[in-house]
Image (cartoon, rainbow, N blue to C red):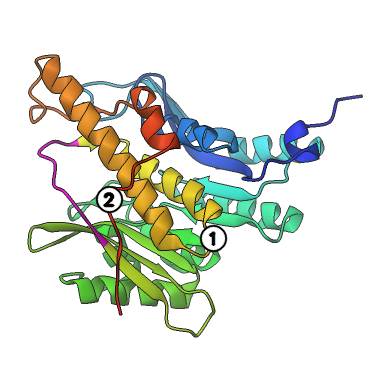
Amino acid sequence: MAPPILSLALPSETGRVLSIQSHTVQGYVGNKSAVFPLQLLGYDVDPINSVQFSNHTGYPTFKGQVLDGQQLWDLIEGLEGNDLLYYTHLLTGYIGSVSFLNTVLEVISKLRSKNPELTYVCDPVMGDDGKLYVPQELVSVYREKVVPVASMLTPNQFEAELLTGFRIQSEGDGREACKFLHAVGPSKVVITSINIDGILLVIGSHQKEQGQPPKQFKIVIPKIPAYFTGTGDLMTALLLGWSNKYPDNLEMAAELAVSSLQALLQRTLRDYTSAGHDPQSTSLEIRLIQSQDDIRSPQVKFKAEIYS
């Protein structure tokens, strides 16, 4: 007889997260960028690696394996067969095929049959700066099937435009995009980066009751003259972690997440520079392990401005 699973028998105050994302042997993207921060914030995290690559695809070469929808379902059935399928949160990031995304939808349904209160945090990773890096047909699946079942959505500016069908060229457009997405499903929306006239913003929106106007805010974030990998995956994980601790205060959760991330990026920049590397010459791997204090106990240096 198997011993009890203590994360189920003695659940933490935070929760138990199933995280379905990519995995790299070296570097910090996908699950490698999300699991450790959530663990630091007190969560039990069970990762399913949608791909296992030697390194992220920005390097000259990469090798590895890709999980298909049937293999994902096999893992879910294995967990269910041992009564291990109770989760408080599901987190998804990069998904590369329609068949895999459709299986994720089945996973959501299965998890909610075990726990109707399941919080589904979706980072709809589709592209950036006007360029898609997933097949075009994924856009309609996200728009029509995934967004309606999400609890929290964390698109970037381009992804929010894809999901809503309209351009975001002002703060007002960003706020309207959030309202549009609320009407489809998620009660919490955070557009994690919007470039308005050269100023970078986070725009967040929390609709506490259907039909009620959402509480909306912005956080201005500095532009750093470098490109980092894994930051979106980390930001979404931090938003999950902090918004669960402050369920009625999305702006505080976003302040903590942004402040953590910015401290980590500044450390990464300093460390590459001190090693003699030009940070603008290549994309930079984030200094996740070295920034664990900033993840666990961030100093809030970036404040939310509430829209009236």
* Secondary structure category for the residue under label 1: loop
x then y, percent, for residue 29: 36, 32
Residue at 20% across, 69% down: 168
Q: Nearer the viewer, residue 63 or 208?
A: 208
Q: Which residue is mark 2?
A: 127
- For residue 272, say whether it is visible: yes
How many numbered marks does the figure carry? 2
x then y, percent, for residue 134: 33, 48
Q: Which residues are magenta?
A: 219-227
Q: Which residue is mark 1?
A: 247
Amino acid residing under circle 2 = Gly
Q: Nearer the viewer, residue 187 or 76?
A: 187
User: Which quadrant, please, contains the N terminus?
Assistant: top right
Q: Earlier in the sequence, mark 2 or mark 1?
A: 2
* Secondary structure category for the residue under label 2: strand
Residue at 65% across, 50% down: 88
User: Which quadrant, please, contains the C terminus?
Assistant: bottom left
Residue at 52% across, 40% down: 20
Amino acid residing under circle 1 = Pro
Q: Nearer the viewer, mark 2 or mark 1?
A: 1
Within 10 Å of disc 2 (Cα), the crowding (few <14, some 14-19, many 20+) is some
Q: Is residue 109 magenta?
A: no
Q: Is residue 141 above or below residue 84?
A: below
x then y, percent, for residue 198: 8, 58
Dominant secondary structure (helix, strand or loop) of the stretch shown in magenta: loop
Is residue 53 shown left or right of residue 114? left
x then y, percent, for residue 188: 46, 65
Q: Nearer the viewer, residue 232 or 42?
A: 42
Q: Is residue 70 above or below residue 301?
A: above
Q: Quadrant of residue 142?
A: bottom left
